[in-house]
Image: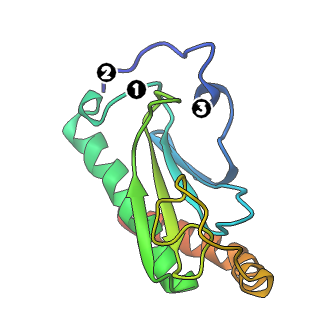
Amino acid sequence: MTAEPKAPACELCFADGGSLVVRNELLRVVLVDDPDYPGYARVIVNAHVKEMTNLDAPALARVMAAVYAVEDALRAVLAPDKVNLASFGNLVPHLHWHVIPRFVDDAHFPQPIWGVRQREPAAEKLAARRARLAQLAEAIRVRLAAAAA
């Protein structure tokens, strides 16, 4: 892996980036506190790298296995209509993946969550999804452990 020194202005070098679910020597998985998107997760490489090609083949495979494990846990626990996977890094050039459960009744569907808001989501549906976050975190931990075995 070709890591750069921690960047003083990089928020992901010095903070978890959300509620920590699991951390190992390569990466961490966090749940993002987004009121419209309970279950929104990030897979964040611990070292300050900008691009996927900064990773060697084994690290690359482990990061993608973690992304897939988080997606699988989201699907099992929250049963979203779709899961969005994204890796941008334009504003925070520290390698991380967004794993976002999407529902046809969410605030932005079918637009990206950074797009134009389409509706106000039903408070009871958001609350029901929030109530499953502990179950989601456990499902993520189980799947990551299985992927590492």
- Which residue type carries mark 1? Val
**What residue does disc 3 label?**
12
Q: Which label lies toward us, 2 or 3?
A: 3
- Can residue 148 be seen at all in this image of the molecule? no
Q: CA distance from mark 1 to mark 3?
A: 11 Å
Q: Which residue is mark 1?
A: 49
Q: State whether residue 77 is above or below residue 34.
A: below
Q: Nearer the viewer, residue 87 or 58?
A: 87
Residue that appears at 24% across and 43% down: 58
Q: Which type of secondary structure does the marked residue at label 3 adopt?
A: helix
Whether label 1 touches label 2, CB < 8 Å: yes
Question: Which residue is located at x 65 percent, y 42 percent?
Answer: 17
Q: Is residue 19 above or below residue 89?
A: below
Question: Quick check: 132 above or below 92?
Answer: below
For the point 29% across and 36% down, which residue is it? Answer: 52
Q: Which residue is mark 2?
A: 2
Give the amino acid type for the residue marked by disc 2 in the picture: Thr
Residue 125, x across and y down, in percent: 72, 85
- Of 147 and 63, nearer the camera is 63
In the rendered structure, which amino acid carries the disc numbered 3?
Leu
